[in-house]
Amino acid sequence: MKILGTSVDAIDLAEDRDRFRMMMEELNIPMPESGMASNLDQALEVAKRIGYPLMVRPSYVLGGRGMEVIYDEEMLERYVAAAVDITPERPILIDRFLENALETEADALSDGVEAFVPAVMEHIEQAGIHSGDSACVIPPVSISAEHLQTIEEYTRKIAQKLHVVGLMNMQYAISHDVVYVLEANPRASRTVPLVSKVCNVSMARIATQMMMNKKMNELGLKKRNIPHYGVKESVFPFNMFPEVDPLLGPEMRSTGEVLGLADSFGMAFYKAEEAAKPSLPEEGTVMITVAAKDRSAELVEVAREFQRLGFAIKATNGTHKVLAENGIQSEKIKKIYEGRPNIDDAIKNKEVQLVINTPIGKASQYDDSYIRKAAIKYKVPYITTIAAASAAAKGIAASKSGHSAAKSLQEYHRDIK
């Protein structure tokens, strides 16, 4: 949760958090459990009450600076020991981390009484990755109509309760069929230009009119059906820093973003990846190495789709076994500590054209860093979530089908009803 207001005074901070939580309870809107701590004992007490994993951060941050997902007591002790500014006046904030949740955003326009949400954005990466680093799609492709209605309803309620006039950004997570509010940002967001382009709604101009006392009913805002898709992808500077692990997390690391527009989600994703570089391959070998918890039916479907597209598959031991059990042929490949030839050799020798590596969990964040570094060094596209791997497969399929005719922004806008 992002605290409303920018005070770093402990009393004001605690009051802000408590006030916002009471507001959400009054509106019957769920939030992850949270707490504050000024020392290790307090942090351990909050962790015991909330349970791991945790999202821990300094009391006031920009761009997710200093935020970290904590999986156990050892990591929490290390974080508190390294937090040089932790004092009663500058406590750390601790929230329950909703692991494997689907994150989503909503930009809204509000006149202080009514609120309008042009579109909901669905993040492709899992919750826990900074919103500025996550790819997202407008309109959503996997969020149910019920949850979309809930998100729009919560956004309207919060905007009305806070008497927001102008722009507002809300961030949510969907976990175990429940929509949780993560952040309430009563301001413009970096996603406003994206929503404006995809939905043909000039949000900045309309927000300015609202701030000049125009009301919602005077502006003729209506919900529209968006027949195309817009995919925002982040641009990273990792090729300039080959020794840096490109693993994404709560701290923002991107330096720009691009937008892909197309009539299908797959083609929009492919265009966005092509603009962000490196482009997705249309043939060759995909290397798959995923955490045990990701060896699921969804992984099998992704691998089967790549096989259908004509890709050869290399997989590490655990993933290879799961694929074999489901009738998918793959070549077993060694991790770097299992001997040679291994993953690093395959990437270096251009035997692999796409890397799928899901570093979820404490150990794999560090053990698999060489895979991601090698992919960056040798300019091989890499993917770190099963959801993004599925999107990539759809994108490659769309590109291979040849349905990639260019259209102007005006042509997309003319099709909006």
Image (spheres, rainbow, N blue to C red):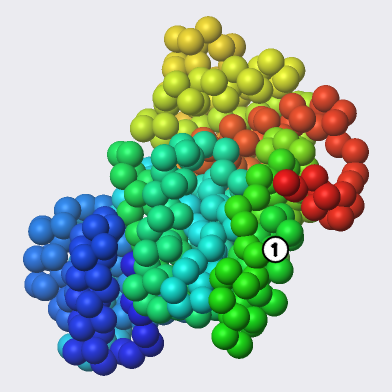
Amino acid of disc 1: Val
Residue at 44%, 74% in the rendered image: 113
Q: Which residue is mark 1?
A: 201
Percent position of residue 60, x then y: 36, 82
Pick the residue in front: 29 or 73: 29
Q: Is residue 107 above or below residue 82?
A: above
Quarter of the image holding residue 351? top right
Is residue 102 toward the left or the right of residue 18 in the image?
right
Q: Is residue 351 visible?
A: no
Residue at 82%, 27% in the rendered image: 400
Quarter of the image holding residue 183? bottom left
Name, please, the residue furthest toward the front. 218
Crowding near pointer 1: few (<14 within 10 Å), some, many (20+)? some
Q: Is residue 59 above or below residue 347?
A: below
Percent position of residue 406, x then y: 90, 44
Say which quadrant the N terminus sits in: bottom left
Pick the residue in front: 48 or 409: 409
Is residue 272 toward the left or the right of residue 130 in the image?
right
Pick the residue in front: 40 or 53: 53
Residue at 45%, 55% in the rendered image: 152
Percent position of residue 416, x then y: 75, 48
**Of helix, strand and loop, which one carries label 1?**
loop
Residue at 73%, 46% in the rendered image: 417
Is residue 229 toward the left or the right of residue 66 in the image?
right
Is residue 412 toward the left or the right of residue 164 in the image?
right
Q: Is residue 17 visible?
A: yes
Percent position of residue 123, x then y: 53, 50
